Amino acid sequence: MSQKIHHREDVKPERGEHEYGDVEFADPVNKKYPVDTPEHVRAAWSYINHKDNAAKYSTEEVEKIKGHIKRAAKKHDVVIKED
């Protein structure tokens, strides 16, 4: 699972930083899916599990993003439902 997440042409990473600040993102390359609060962790999990959002990434990238979200969920004591 060491594969890098690739830059998406449809995303402007600076928008994520502008909107959320200097926070941890499940997709740090594209600054998508902030996971700095329990609410953001829940939202990130919900969004990455939507087929249209996941389709923008490779299977390996989705697993890497989900791994980041799961670690953040543990850190913030958030229970997430596995797929």
Image (tube, rainbow, N blue to C red):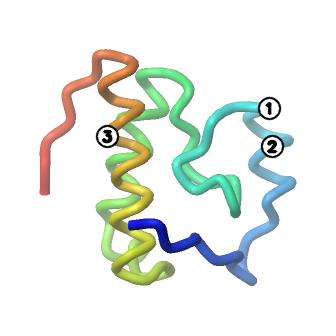
Quadrant in which the N terminus appears: bottom left
**Looking at the picture, which amino acid does disc 3 mark?**
Lys
Q: In this view of the protein, which residue sits in the foreground, 56 or 60?
A: 60
The Cα atoms of the two marked residues, 3 and 2, are separated by 21 Å
Residue in view at x 65 percent, y 53 percent: 28
Going from N to C along the chain, the mark reached first, 1 or 3, is 1
Question: Dividing the picture into quarters, in which one does residue 7 lie?
Answer: bottom right
Contact flag, marks 3 and 2 (Cβ < 8 Å): no
**Looking at the picture, which amino acid does disc 1 mark?**
Gly
Residue 21 is labelled as 1
Residue in view at x 38 percent, y 60 percent: 48
**Looking at the picture, which amino acid does disc 2 mark?**
Glu
Residue 4 is labelled as none
Residue position marked by numbered label 2 in the rendering: 17
Percent from the top left, x then y, of residue 73? 33, 29
Q: Is residue 79 above or below residue 43?
A: above
Percent from the top left, x then y, of residue 24? 63, 36
Choose mark 1 or mark 3, whichever is in front: 3
Q: Residues within 10 Å of mark 2 (few under 14, many from 20)?
A: some
* Left or right position of 52 against 18: left
Q: Is residue 27 above or below residue 42?
A: below
Q: In this view of the protein, which residue sits in the foreground, 23 or 51?
A: 23
Residue 70 is labelled as 3
Q: In this view of the protein, which residue sits in the foreground, 56 or 66?
A: 66
Going from N to C along the chain, the mark reached first, 3 or 2, is 2
Q: Furthest-front residue in view?
A: 2
Percent from the top left, x then y, of residue 8? 68, 78
Percent from the top left, x then y, of residue 26? 52, 48
